[in-house]
Image (spheres, grey):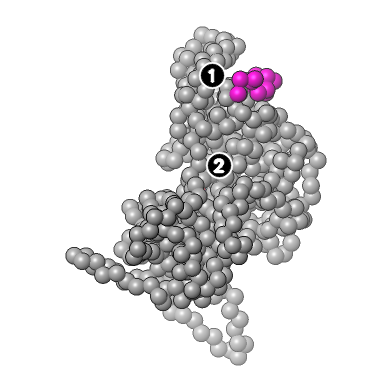
Amino acid sequence: RSLQKNYFSCRRKVGSKSVATKVQTTTKTDECEAKDERKTFDTLQEERREQAERSVLISCPPKISEKKFLKHLSRHGNINNFFFYESFGIYAVVEFSEKDGIASLQEATSITSVSHEATVPFKTRLLSLKANESNSQPPVQCLQQTPIGVNKLVQKLSREDSIDQQSYSLMEEYQLTEENICLRFLVCSLLKDIAAAYFPECIIRPFGSSVNGFGKLGCDLDMFLDLDAISGRNIKQAGDGFSLEYQMKRTSSERAATQSILAVIGECVDQFAPGCAGVQKILNARCPLVRFAHQPSGFQCDLTANNRVAMKSSELLYLYGGLDGRVRPMVFTLRCWARVHGLTSTIPGAWLTNFSLTVMVIFFLQKRSPAILPTLDQLRHLADPRDKSVIEGNDCTFVRDFRRIPDQKNTETLENLLQEFFEFYGNFAFSRMSINIRKGKEQNKPEVSPLHIQNPFEPALNVSKNVNATQLERLVTLCQESAWLLQQGGARGRSPARDTPWGLAALLLPSVSQAIKTKGKKRRAREPASERIKTLLDSLKGSKAAPGGSAGAA
Ligand code: GTP
Ligand code: MG
């Protein structure tokens, strides 16, 4: 019960060091905030953005004295926080308490001349530390920036005592750490320095799973080049009959403007930004973007512009994730389940996306009785004038302050919810009905796509238009089989032989989907469902002989 309470703001804080408390290592602690203290999306993003502006990323030699390193940097200002991580070498993220610290540090940083090569003298906050003396220091403690593999996860979950605990444990392992989120904001801030060469007042904001509360360690970094501060919409005119306007180059459409801005910024990132590699300008996509790898952080980055609706969707997901302690573990569990069984993929195609899957979970939780989550229309009615938001003619208004949303009365366990989720979608009338989180009710499908999930803010669009009939069929079959398997695992509880996969752990074994793909599919025409399920159960038992043995990477 206590695990469920206010889990939203619980963060794993492992080993991040605060200089103010004299290099003290924090071990795994949960810091929970009461609902009233939960920050709005905007407040939290702004705090993190400002923090990133006061931070630097430093590539360090393999053996470095932490003490000397800090002493060296402290000459430039007070250090609020720092941590080390490994990504093809050791890196340190260092946050100064004032921006002046960065200016002073950059003042003292030189440009190395490289023999046989020339450099582009573009100064950024990505630095390299050179140490004259080779000292034999013990290695610094590096924080993990990638999740554990599925094998280990299955083993860990098998040792938990309930399905609810398994779900929380999965989230605990997979969710972004505080430090990883800092690193994401820092990468955005570093790229802003590049884009600011053209647009000095621009902001690069992370969106998607980096900020919506459902991000898994290792997920991509979606970024949005925000030029609104430049447009000067809020400038008041003098009232003396005169006004001045900037002369600006005109383009045929917003899209053409976005494409030309991204083309130039993409080129700049490619030519001048240290650490950015494999830059691809994908300007003809529905949402034009620049894709690249940021090597020092290990993040795969997608930079977009003029993408306000996606930002608003991220904010909505953040709000839903923070409303009830069961939402995030449930989404993490289902995202993991979908990935392990190939329902989602990192490659674009006819697969379900994590975004669509999350909307499906929200819809399901709106349909519980009593409802666990409010509908988007209800959230709109709770909004005050400051929440008003209209993007490209679409009303994107919803309440943003957690305190204005009444608590709900539902007390179902996660085990029950997961079970019901699989049954709900295992029997959903996908052929006729559309999923609509604005109304919290299924509606007649307006078009023929196999899976129809109405875009919450652009009602004419289907967020799962890409999903084909085969993928939908796989989803339905997997839901049906998982409902059954969970019922078996849930009823049995943890096996006395620790490490034997049970409950969610058993659900994540690839043998489940393998059995569906091979045996299940071939026999479907001839066998009744009970036979297919028996086959599945047998295959599951087989896999238990070698715990986690066949669980591949997801
Ligand atoms: P990951 O798979 O962990 O990257 O999840 P994600 O939520 O970041 O998804 P993704 O990177 O595919 O997309 C980033 C964000 O763009 C999402 O969180 C949504 O806000 C938005 N988005 C993605 N797909 C759609 C879509 O089909 N329609 C709309 N309106 N927004 C989308
Ligand atoms: Mg993403």
Residue 553 sits in which quadrant? top left
Q: Which residue is mark 2?
A: 174
User: Is 9 or 432 nearer to us in this picture?
Assistant: 9
Q: Which residue is mark 1?
A: 544
Q: Residue at x 58, y 53 (%)?
A: 25
Residue 228 placement (x, y as % from top left): 53, 68
Q: Is residue 430 left or right of residue 68?
A: right
Question: Can you see residue 201?
Answer: no
Q: Is residue 496 magenta?
A: yes
Judging depth in this view, the residue of 161 and 222 nearest the camera is 161
Residue 204 in the image: state x and y as whole percent. Answer: 49, 63
Q: Secondary structure at mark 1?
A: helix
Q: Residue at x 57, y 40 (%)?
A: 173
Q: Single out the residue that lies furthest toward the bottom.
A: 240
Label 2, label 1: how far apart the Cα atoms are? 24 Å
Three-letter code, disc 1: Lys
Main SS of the magenta segment? helix
Q: Is mark 1 within 8 Å of ligand 1?
A: no
Q: Inspect the magenta stretch and tell me whether residue 528 lies in it.
A: no
Magenta stretch? 483-498
Q: Given the current orientation, which residue lies at the most extreme left position?
A: 116
Rendered view: 151 above or below 455: above
**Crowd around label 1: few <14 · some 14–19 · many ≥20 (10 Å):** some
